[in-house]
Image: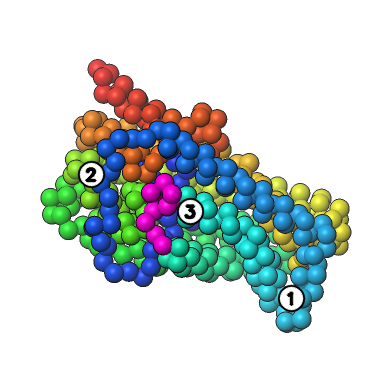
Amino acid sequence: MVGERVVNQSGQPDRAPAVVSTASLSPSPAAAPPPDAIYDAPLARRYHRGQRLLSMGRALLAAAFTLAMVLTGYSTSLETVARRVSQSDYIVLLVFLLLFGALEGLLTFPLRVVSSHVLDRRYRLSNQSFGAWLWESSKGALVGAGVGIPLVLGLYGSLKAFGALWWAPVGGLVFLFTVALARLAPILIFPLFYTFEPVNDKGLRERLTALCERVGMPIQGVFVFNMSKTTKKANAAFTGLGRSKRIILADTLVANFTDEEIETVFAHELGHSKLGHLGVLLLAGFLSTFVGLAACAVAFDALLPLVGFPDRTAIAGLPLLGLLLSVYSVVTSPLVNMLSRSQELAADRYGVRLTGRPQDFVNALRKLASVNLAELQPPRLIEALFHSHPSLERRIQLIERSDQAP
Ligand SMILES: [Zn+2]
């Protein structure tokens, strides 16, 4: 999590704010298609099965590459190459990571193209050209590097300075980064990918502002962003912490949904905010980060001698630490997802109570399923492991049931 709670209503695993779109002209409403009248369940199933296989394939390939590099000694050769560039360990580390990352990126590139470009085009979720996709992905990688490089340097400094307790300062650093990004991402990062404009429609704006006033929520504004230029998916999110809170609505949402439906979606987002969900997620992330780093530190120390590295500051051995951290995050993500799913249901209940319009919310969820090609009923195990949102079928059932309750 980049500190952002990007809340998609679709019931699919959240993806990063579909890191997309060029420095932009104004959104073209023509690009936003009308939602399909008929929801195609088999199509959605095929799409999601394909995406799951690809993402698992990518993770396994990356893990196998890391292990192979470390075990065969190629990682050490790469460090030797990097040492020709500079005397400074920190520069060597950056060059090493650049080379390592480039090799891994090349290896997994075809799978990335298929999962985030080819499939989305084939299933008519995206209208982006390959060039535009490549440009957006590169921008995303650069932003990732901008965030990741200070963290990696901090981690390496901590390994050198604090010995076996290196994980404690790193945990603190990660937490500070997360909180800072939650505040700054809406201001610094989102505009790199999207154009934000205040919502034009006076009726809609007043409707949403009135809702905020009813629950005593200070808000910086209601903005629409041009999601339509890269995807047909619709999304709504609540970004920022404290007083920098703002609501952002995808133009695909504004174009295709009635004001009543948008209000119910927005009320769900208000629920996340009023119920303090971001704070809970940050706290859970804080605990999970420290536990994870401590556990990985122990495993790292145990494994390093087995793969022939004398000490934990050996640069060529660091990819092993990266692999351990990835494994930790995969293993704990079902827990994070469980927390997230319970928050989603709580926000649903809050939103429906606030607006008193369950049917509009149900309609909105069905439309979202259609434009996002979400699986209405993913396999239960898949949902438990991978989904940050409960299945739409279950959400709709719960809303309808609570509507019938006295
Ligand atoms: Zn939500």
| Number of the label disc, if any, that sits on residue 257 | 2
Q: Quadrant of residue 366?
A: top left
Q: Secondary structure beneath disc 2?
A: loop
- Residue 101 or 210: which is nearer the viewer? 101
* Extent of the magenta region: 120-129
Q: Is residue 395 magenta?
A: no
Whether residue 69 is situated above or below residue 390 in the rendered picture: below
Amino acid under label 3?
Val
Label whose residue precedes the other's in the sequence (3 or 2): 3
Label whose residue precedes the other's in the sequence (1 or 3): 1
Dot 2, how many residues are within 10 Å of its Cα: few (below 14), some (14-19), or many (20+)?
many
Q: Secondary structure beneath disc 1?
A: helix
- Residue 92 or 194: which is nearer the viewer? 194
Label whose residue precedes the other's in the sequence (1 or 2): 1
Answer yes or no: disc 1 within 8 Å of ligand 1: no
| Number of the label disc, if any, that sits on residue 118 | 3
Answer yes or no: disc 3 within 8 Å of ligand 1: no
**Image check: 254 left or right of 382?**
left
Foreground label between 1 and 3: 3
| Number of the label disc, if any, that sits on residue 82 | 1
**Image check: 210 left or right of 275?**
left
Q: At x 41% / y 43%, what residue is drawn?
A: 277
- Residue 94 or 53: which is nearer the viewer? 53
How far apart marks 1 and 3 lie (CA) works out to 35 Å
User: Residue 119: percent from the left, percent from the top?
Assistant: 47, 49
How far apart marks 1 and 2 lie (CA) works out to 54 Å
Q: In which quarter of the image is the C terminus?
A: top left
